[in-house]
Amino acid sequence: MHKFSPCPAGWIYYQSIGSCFRQLDAPFTFAEARQSCREFGNTSELLQIDEENEDEELFLAFWHFQSGISWIGVQIEDSKLKWLHGAAVAGSTRLKLQDHLKNGSCIAIQLEDTHVKLVNVSCDERITNTLCKMKAPK
């Protein structure tokens, strides 16, 4: 996180990955959360990891917002976790995967001590926090 920010007001800038993060504090279903993030512009989407080194940034962004549970850009396809852009979700030292995936459910992220955990949630459940990400404007 850095003081100079090319991001719009209300967004947090992480220079190392050139991305902006924002938390929305309103009760949304998964579909509503995704639509709300997209309304900020064509590169804005539910938070996703695009490169291997971004899992640390995900943790720091989530830690910054101190959210209990939040929607992010993960879905279950064929009993496998995938980011909305199609890449498989891999665990890391900061990102813990839940063992029992339920087809037809959506995924949220929850802070747990020194890591974040992906948890099954009904897609129709209204979660108060949503994490959005966009590429920083140049």
Image (cartoon, rainbow, N blue to C red):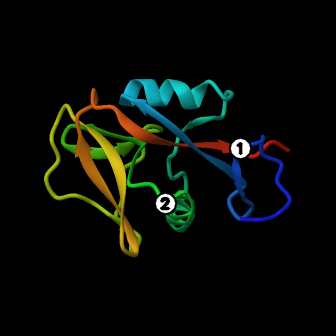
Q: Residue at x 52, y 59 (%)?
A: 58
Q: Residues within 10 Å of mark 2 (few under 14, many from 20)?
A: few
Q: Residue at x 66, y 29 (%)?
A: 40
What residue did someone put label 2 on? 66
Of residues 35 and 17, which is closer to you in this image? 35
What residue did someone put label 1 on? 10
Residue type, mark 1 in image? Gly
Where is residue 133 shown, x and y percent of the image?
Answer: 60, 44
For the C terminus, which image quadrant? top right
Q: Are marks 1 and 2 in contact (CB under 8 Å)?
A: no
For the N terminus, which image quadrant? bottom right
Say whether residue 77 is visible.
Answer: yes
* Residue 92: image tag: none
Of residues 80 and 75, which is closer to you in this image? 75
Q: Residue at x 78, y 65 (%)?
A: 2
Residue type, mark 2 in image? Gln
